[in-house]
Amino acid sequence: MSIPGMLLTGLGVFSLVVSLKRLRSRRDLARNGKLAHGVVCAIAERPQPYNYRKSTGYAPVIRFATEQGAEIKYTPAEWTKTSVFSEGDRVEVVYDPLDPQLAMIRDPRVNRKALLIMAGVGAAFLLGGILLLIGVLPIQ
């Protein structure tokens, strides 16, 4: 057994499972969630802990009301190097009616490429690991 092949295969499976699960949950939320109109009430900032340049990450804090009238403040899990939104911006939010904190912004400025890239890298690792395991790619 090739240890590098097993490691690449395992990493590929992990990356694929995580990214595809997140993409699926976003798709399900977009299909089954409730639409609300919200407003950006603040821009949250936090230091990026794993960035050697000590940069800051930004995410909008969005206030919206559910169909039942409950006011929710939502901050997406995705943080960016530059703020895509400004305070006062109006946005559409899709939320889970059973748990309104499970939400997502429906806006073309929100980039979802990271999950697709993670899935692609996972697939490449999986393929490379399998090729190492079956001996098509030699280890030198």
Image (cartoon, rainbow, N blue to C red):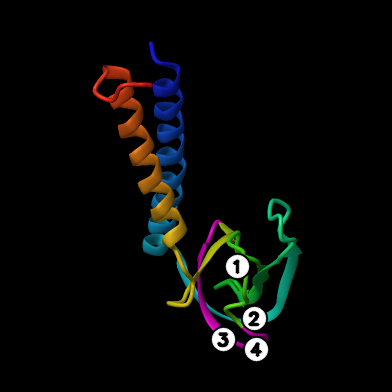
**Comparing marks 1 and 4, which lies closer to the viewer?**
1
Around disc 3, counting alpha carbons within 10 Å, would you say few (fewer than 14), some (14 to 19), or many (20 or more)? some
Q: Residue at x 33, y 32 (%)?
A: 128
The three-letter code of the residue at mark 2 reads Val
Question: Counting residues from the N terminus, which is met first, the one under dot 4 or under dot 2?
Answer: 2
**Residue 26 position in % (x across, y down):** 43, 57
**Residue 29 position in % (x across, y down):** 44, 59
Instruction: Indicate the secondary structure of the residue bearing disc 1.
Output: loop
Q: Residue at x 46, y 68 (%)?
A: 111
* Residue 84 placement: quadrant: bottom right
Question: Counting residues from the N terminus, which is met first, the one under dot 3 or under dot 1?
Answer: 1
- Taking the view exactly as shown, the residue that stands out farthest to the top is 1
- Near-viewer residue (133 or 88): 133
Label 1 vs label 2: CA separation? 15 Å
Q: Which residue is mark 1?
A: 80
Q: Which residues are magenta?
A: 86-98
Q: Residue at x 39, y 54 (%)?
A: 116
Q: Are marks 2 and 3 in contact (CB under 8 Å)?
A: yes
Q: Are marks 3 and 4 in contact (CB under 8 Å)?
A: yes
- Queried whether the magenta region covers residue 95, the answer comes back as yes
The three-letter code of the residue at mark 3 reads Arg
Q: Are marks 4 and 2 in contact (CB under 8 Å)?
A: yes
